[in-house]
Image (tube, rainbow, N blue to C red):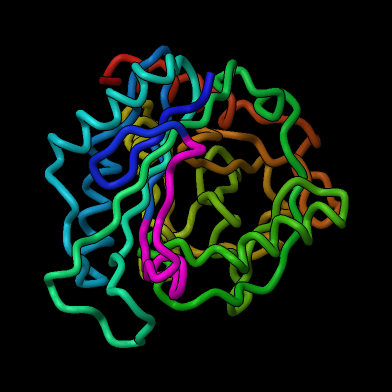
Amino acid sequence: MSRIVYVNGQYLPEAEATVSIFDRGFLMADAVYEVTSVLDGKLLDFAGHQARLARSLNELEMQRPCSDDELLAIHRELVTRNDLTDGMIYLQVTRGNPGDRDFAFPDASVKPTLVLFTQSKPGMADAPAAKTGIKVISIDDLRWGRRDIKTVQLLYPSLGKMMAKKAGADDAWLVEDGHVTEGTSNNAYIVKGGRIITRNLSHDILHGITRAAVLRFAAEAQMEVEERPFTIAEAKAADEAFYTSASGFVTPVVEIDGAAIGTGKPGAVAKRLREIYLDESRKTAI
């Protein structure tokens, strides 16, 4: 069965879905996106993703394509039409199609382009990486300075993923001024002496929705959290490490730049946080 996608008010078979070659998302990467995970047919952290979408749009002075209620209805319709049980819904908003290429923003009469599609990931909550952990390498962070805006400018993170793959690893942690910013598509953490350490929020990192939930659950579980930058040397000397993301939830990191972290196996803190996150998120999924 062909996947059904959404493009500017229409639900279409994916083979029939098109966007203009003059769309600024295509020509300028002038677009933002969100990815909402689906477990058991329900949306996780939906309110958080929509709040961050609104912030990204506001930071780029981009029009909202529709209301939050309408976006929720579209998400639910795509879940239903694609019989999605476990997976993700990708949403992208661009500044639209002004009819030609120009660096200047088009006027308000040009409506934003709104695209959504599903990705089925059966058994996503039981991903093998959660049990084995992943290996990462460190690379220089060469992205633009506004990483807090979730734009589609993902060339360097993609290059980072490929650098990791060529090095026999799973992902890369980005380093700027001697400190880890984040992973290519996730927020990064280490654990030392029972204390969870992760970089504080700023323009330097994406304000992860899963990050916010995990840190809230950690505090409720009486875990100590310290929000500050940390170095690769600190990571190598840590008791354990992990990352968070919308689709990876909480995933252990067991090696960095060839050095085992802690025992070289997933640690107790990461395991417990993953359990708590999945349990609590399923309770509040919509």
Front position in the image: 58 or 99: 99
Where residue 219 appears, x then y in whole percent? Answer: 34, 35
Front position in the image: 142 or 41: 41
Q: Which residues are magenta?
A: 14-32
Q: Furthest-front residue in view?
A: 16
Where residue 171 appears, x then y in whole percent? Answer: 70, 51
Front position in the image: 188 or 88: 88
Q: Residue at x 35, y 27 (%)?
A: 44
Residue 164 lies within the magenta run: no
Determine whether 219 is above or below 137 in the image: above
Say which quarter of the image contains residue 270.
top right
Image quarter hosting the C terminus = top left
Q: Is residue 70 left or right of residue 244?
A: left
Q: Residue at x 27, y 47 (%)?
A: 8
Where residue 285 appears, x then y in whole percent? Answer: 30, 20
Q: Residue at x 61, y 72 (%)?
A: 141
Say which quarter of the image contains residue 175.
bottom right
Q: Residue at x 49, y 41 (%)?
A: 245
Tag count: 0
Where residue 272 appears, x then y in whole percent? Answer: 53, 23
Q: Does residue 164 show up?
A: yes
Q: Does residue 58 show up?
A: no
Residue 19 lies within the magenta run: yes
Determine whether 59 is above or below 67 in the image: below
Q: Is residue 106 left or right of residue 175?
A: left
